[in-house]
Image (cartoon, rainbow, N blue to C red):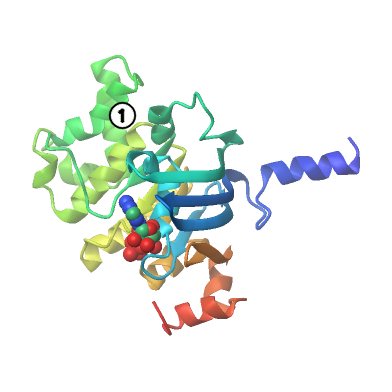
């Protein structure tokens, strides 16, 4: 293999920003709501087994961009995505892409915990069942237990799996939603301000959980809390007015930002 071929191969497997395997890549992505451009020509790579935080002032497009990573914007009538987003090199917007399957591979956890109004067990079992992941009841039981264990909820709910998911505390509900995302064996988990409705203790548990989960998944988290971004993420992208102003190692973004606008934001001069 010549030097150029080796270089190309390495580039294909790692992000240009970091020496980490690449999971998703967005190139020249713009997102419109009708005529309004909410995301303007964003290119960013999401590495495997890292937590990537999206920070930035309200309305700068973090959630819009996050939703474009699993085509959740498709559910918004006037939203339109331009550019290319790949998952393991495969264009997720290509024709013929199975969007239901994509959303299992790239799961999502929302700001407000949203368990189904069903039992704790059914909240987890529903996804594997509709995706045909499992055949027997014993296998399904196993997936339910394992997902709840990974989400750090098993010990609290193992004796009440038939109770309604909505009867749990807010923090438990959010861990249930994380368990529900895990149950369909995702590769990427998108989290849109997952702690904003939680108290500090429940928040700390979710943050610990995120840290545990990153050994298996690529995680992307939108957060308004810079302390949270600094605590849980290894990579941070600073969004402003629909653009990514700066993207890099979290420690660099918070201690040594290159851009004046990043510095202003992290020092609380605006936002
Ligand atoms: N469904 C929608 N229809 C029209 N405009 C929208 C829609 N959703 C978001 N927008 C607009 O797109 C821009 C980006 O919004 P977005 O929610 O992505 O920002 P954000 O950075 O996540 O904000 P926040 O931190 O407040 O949640 C904003 O101007 C917002 O008003």
**On the image, which quarter does residue 10 sit in?**
top right
User: Which residue extends farthest right?
Assistant: 2
Q: Nearer the viewer, residue 137 or 196?
A: 196
Specify whether 179 is left or right of 123. Answer: right
Return the x and y of residue 263 as percentages of the image width and height: 53, 80
Return the x and y of residue 250 as percentages of the image width and height: 53, 67
In this rendering, is residue 111 above or below 241? above
For the point 26% across and 62% down, which residue is it? Answer: 196
* Quadrant that contains the N terminus: top right
Q: Would you name the residue on which mark 1 appears?
A: 143
Inspect this view and state whether residue 154 appears: yes
Specify whether 133 is left or right of 248. Answer: left
Specify whether 253 is left or right of 179. Answer: right
Ligand 1 positioned in quadrant: bottom left
Return the x and y of residue 66 as percentages of the image width and height: 43, 51
The residue carrying mark 1 has its beta carbon less than 8 Å from ligand 1: no
In this rendering, is residue 210 above or below 124? below
* Quadrant that contains the C terminus: bottom left
Return the x and y of residue 225 as percentages of the image width and height: 36, 70
Label 1 Cα neighbours within 10 Å, binned few <14 / some 14-19 / many ≥20:
many
In this rendering, is residue 196 above or below 90? below
Inspect this view and state whether residue 209 appears: no
Q: Nearer the viewer, residue 125 or 243?
A: 243
For the point 27% across and 33% down, which residue is it? Answer: 145
């Amino acid at each position: 293999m010549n030097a150029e071929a080796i270089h190309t191969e390495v580039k294909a497997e790692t992000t240009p920003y970091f020496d980490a395997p690449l999971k998703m890549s967005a190139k020249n992505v713009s997102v419109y709501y009708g005529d309004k451009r909410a995301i303007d020509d964003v290119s960013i790579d999401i590495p495997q087994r890292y937590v990537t935080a999206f920070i930035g002032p309200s309305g700068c497009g973090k959630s819009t961009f996050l939703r474009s990573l699993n085509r959740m914007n498709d559910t918004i009538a006037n939203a339109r995505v331009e550019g290319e987003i790949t998952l393991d090199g495969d264009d997720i917007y290509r024709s013929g892409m199975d969007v239901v399957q994509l959303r299992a591979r790239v799961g999502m956890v929302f700001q407000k915990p949203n368990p189904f109004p069903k039992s704790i067990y059914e909240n987890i079992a529903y996804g594997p069942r509709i995706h045909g992941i499992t055949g027997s009841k014993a296998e399904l039981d196993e997936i339910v237990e394992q997902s709840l264990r990974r989400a750090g909820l098993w010990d609290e709910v193992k004796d009440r799996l038939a109770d309604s998911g909505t009867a749990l505390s807010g923090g438990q509900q959010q861990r249930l939603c994380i368990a529900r995302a895990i149950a369909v064996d995702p590769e990427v988990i998108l989290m849109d301000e997952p702690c904003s409705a939680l108290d500090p203790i429940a928040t700390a548990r979710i943050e610990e959980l995120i840290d545990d989960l990153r050994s298996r998944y690529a995680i992307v988290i939108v957060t308004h809390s810079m302390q949270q971004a600094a605590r849980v993420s290894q990579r941070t992208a600073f969004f402003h007015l629909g653009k990514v102003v700066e993207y890099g190692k979290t420690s660099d973004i918070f201690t040594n930002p290159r851009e004046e606008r990043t510095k202003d934001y992290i020092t609380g001069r605006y936002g």
